[in-house]
Structures are given as C-alpha cells and as structure tokens.
C-alpha cells in the first residue's frame, strides 16, 4: 500500500499519453467540425484558452470543449442563495446533524476503516473529521452534483461578473485537469459551482491536493472512495492541520464587544487575550493558543465558541464558520455513535 501525497503535475500521475486518446473521444462526442459556440467566441474565453495553451493544452481541443458549454440559469440562481448566507446557525445545523447522516457516517467509516486509518496516520487528521466532511459535502458520495462541470464553470466565469475572476481561473484549471488526467470532460459532473466528487474539490484544488491512495495514475475522486478520503486528508494536512490538537471549544461571553466577532476566521488573538476581553472557554485550554471567537445564532439567542487553529483549517475547505461547526458537530456525532455501536 502506498499513500501518494504529491500530485501537482500530470507527470507524477504517469498519464502523458492520455490527451491523445481523450482528444479522439472528445472529438467524437462534440463534433469538432461544428463552429465554436457562443462562450468560445467571447474575449474572456479566448484568453482562458490561450493561457491553457501556454500550459500545454491544445488550443483546438480547449476551444471545442468550451464550445460545448451551455449556460445554465439554474446555476446562477443557486449561487445567489447559498445556505450559509440565508439561514441562521440553528437552521443550517439541522440540515447536516440528522440521525440518518450520523448513522450512514458510521457505515461509511466501517466500510473504509482501513483506508481512513492509513490516511489518518499519515496526515494526523482524525477519521471522523474526514468522514464528516464527505458527509456534509455529498452525503457520503450520494449527492455529488448533476451539473456538467464545464457548464457550471463557463456559466459562472462568463455570466456571473461578481466572481468572474475566480471561476475563470477554475475553468482554466479544469481544462488542464481534463487534458492532463485523461478524464472525459463532458462526463464529469459536480455542483452548481463546479465542485467535484465525494469531497467536492474545485478544479484548482484537485490539481493541487488530490492524491491517489495507492497505485499510479490520476486520483479518482468521483468513483474511488479511497482516493477521495486520501485527498480530503491531504487537503487538510496541506492547509496546516495539527495532529492531536483541539478544534473548537464552547465558551461563555460576558458583555461581548460586537466588533470582537467581526475579525474574520483566522485566529489572531491568544486565548489569554480573549479571556481578558470576556470570552471564557468552558474547559481548560493553553492560554497561549491562538483562537478566533465565534458567535452563532441559536433559537433562544446566541451561542459562543473559540475556534482554534484546526477549526481555521476546516474553514479553508469552505470559508464559513457555520460550515466548520457543522463538520465538527457531525464528526463528534459519528464518532460517538460508532463507539456506542461497538460497545
């Protein structure tokens, strides 16, 4: 068994011959003789294709792929109302903290326990955290998205001005991903934002952090749970996960300064400094540890926590305190249920 935690270029995947075969398959699917579609004619698309060409992707191949992209209004509608922005914490939490998501997390853990143990040993990330991320993202691979990735990324790159720069870069990364890995780009599906596979990796994250659990070739985060597990673990490791360190602790707040909770997700205060400002952890914790104060709306008011360095790492997966809290709560629920099952 080998854990491969370095896949930043296609050479390490050993698939340099794949683009020739993929070009033939793509050509047959989208009829290369057809004139370029509306997206491919846009100046921004031409620039993406040129950038991909400089990175080694055939320009005609990229043009044909972008030509096949179709604008999806439902994608624009969905991105305008993310749950993190429209729901209070107590409603958002109920989406993910359900008996079924917990019980099926136990099943997923049991089915892949050897892989989870191996990845955890290398990365230091507890199995329950990896399982919970996959559970929150895709219900353990059941709900991975129904949009063609090329449609999602092109729609958002060219018809969503507010985040056009971000999705244009992701579109370029997708062209590189498909060209290098040998994946059929018209068959790859994902979320409305173009996130893919069990762990919902964006194309740039796939190219930077996706890993094979064992063997050679491009990581398969779509159909291979072992690759998805190793990729999630590697992502958290590369973003600074500290093995055997706490993630978050509950807190009480005396006369809170509202501005204290508006400093962003990155820990910039020590626990001692936060205690001095009235944020009291509910358990003993190193006073020198860095933390960020978190206040979230519950049904009868506000609840408070101290998010530590590992909490911040989880927010690198999705830049939301509510998301990281949902992952953490689900991870603890799964770990508790699995332990009770084995008693």
Image (cartoon, helix red, strand yellow):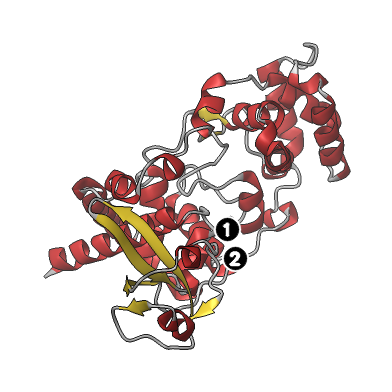
The earlier-in-sequence mark between 2 and 1 is 2
Question: From what the image shows, is residue 124 above or below residue 273?
Answer: above
Residue marked by disc 2? 5
Quadrant for residue 211, please give it.
Answer: bottom right
Q: Position of residue 195 (x, y in %)?
A: 54, 41
Check if mark 2's residue and mark 1's residue have beta carbons within 8 Å: yes
C-alpha span from label 2 to label 1: 6 Å
Residue 44 is tagged as none
Identify the residue at horizontal 31%, vertical 48% (top origin).
Answer: 96
Residue marked by disc 1? 211
Position of residue 89 in the picture relative to residue 243 (left or right): left
Q: Nearer the viewer, residue 25 or 302?
A: 302
Q: Position of residue 277 (x, y in %)?
A: 44, 78
Question: From what the image shows, is residue 22 above or below residue 262?
Answer: above
Q: Residue furthest top?
A: 34
Looking at the rendered structure, the secondary structure element under dot 2 is loop
Looking at the rendered structure, the secondary structure element under dot 1 is loop
Position of residue 42 in the picture relative to residue 235 (left or right): right
Q: Nearer the viewer, residue 322 or 7?
A: 322
Local crowd size for mark 2, using a 10 Å CA cut-off: few (<14), some (14–19), many (≥20): many
Identify the residue at horizontal 52%, vertical 56% (top origin).
Answer: 317
Question: Residue 58: in sight, yes or no?
Answer: no
Local crowd size for mark 1, using a 10 Å CA cut-off: few (<14), some (14–19), many (≥20): many
Identify the residue at horizontal 58%, vertical 21% (top origin).
Answer: 72
Position of residue 231 in the picture relative to residue 114 (left or right): right
Q: Position of residue 308 (x, y in %)?
A: 45, 73
Identify the residue at horizontal 55%, vertical 48% (top origin).
Answer: 201
Question: Residue 341: in sight, yes or no?
Answer: yes
Q: Position of residue 155 (x, y in %)?
A: 64, 26
């Amino acid at each position: 068994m080998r854990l491969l935690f370095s896949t930043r270029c296609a050479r390490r995947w050993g698939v340099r011959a794949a683009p020739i075969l993929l070009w033939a398959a793509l050509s047959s699917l989208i009829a290369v003789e057809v004139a370029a579609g509306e997206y491919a004619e846009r100046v921004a698309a031409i620039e993406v294709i040129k950038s991909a060409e400089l990175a080694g992707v055939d320009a005609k191949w990229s043009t044909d792929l972008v030509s096949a992209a179709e604008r999806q209004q439902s994608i624009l509608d969905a991105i305008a109302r993310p749950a993190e922005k429209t729901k209070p914490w107590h409603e958002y939490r109920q989406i993910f903290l359900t008996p079924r998501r917990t019980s099926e997390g136990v099943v997923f853990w049991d089915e892949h326990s050897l892989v989870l143990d191996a990845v955890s040993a290398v990365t230091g990330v507890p199995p329950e955290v990896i399982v919970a991320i996959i559970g929150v993202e895709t219900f353990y691979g059941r709900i991975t998205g129904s949009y063609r990735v090329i449609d999602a990324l092109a729609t958002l790159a060219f018809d969503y001005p507010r985040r056009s720069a971000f999705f244009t870069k992701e579109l370029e990364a997708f062209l590189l991903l498909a060209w290098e890995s040998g994946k059929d780009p018209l068959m790859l599906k994902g979320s409305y934002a173009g996130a893919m596979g069990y762990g919902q990796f964006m194309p740039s994250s796939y190219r930077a952090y996706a890993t094979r659990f064992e063997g050679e070739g491009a990581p398969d985060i779509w159909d291979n749970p072992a690759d998805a597990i190793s990729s999630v673990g590697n992502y958290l490791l590369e973003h600074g996960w500290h093995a055997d360190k706490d993630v978050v602790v509950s807190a009480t707040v005396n006369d809170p300064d509202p501005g204290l909770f508006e400093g962003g997700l990155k820990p910039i205060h020590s626990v001692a400094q936060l205690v001095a400002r009235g944020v009291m952890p509910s358990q003993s914790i190193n006073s020198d540890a860095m933390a960020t104060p978190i206040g979230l709306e519950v049904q009868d008011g506000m609840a408070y926590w101290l998010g530590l360095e590992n909490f911040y790492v989880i927010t690198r997966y999705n830049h939301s305190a509510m998301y990281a809290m949902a992952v953490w709560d689900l991870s603890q629920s799964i770990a508790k249920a699995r332990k009770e099952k084995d008693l």
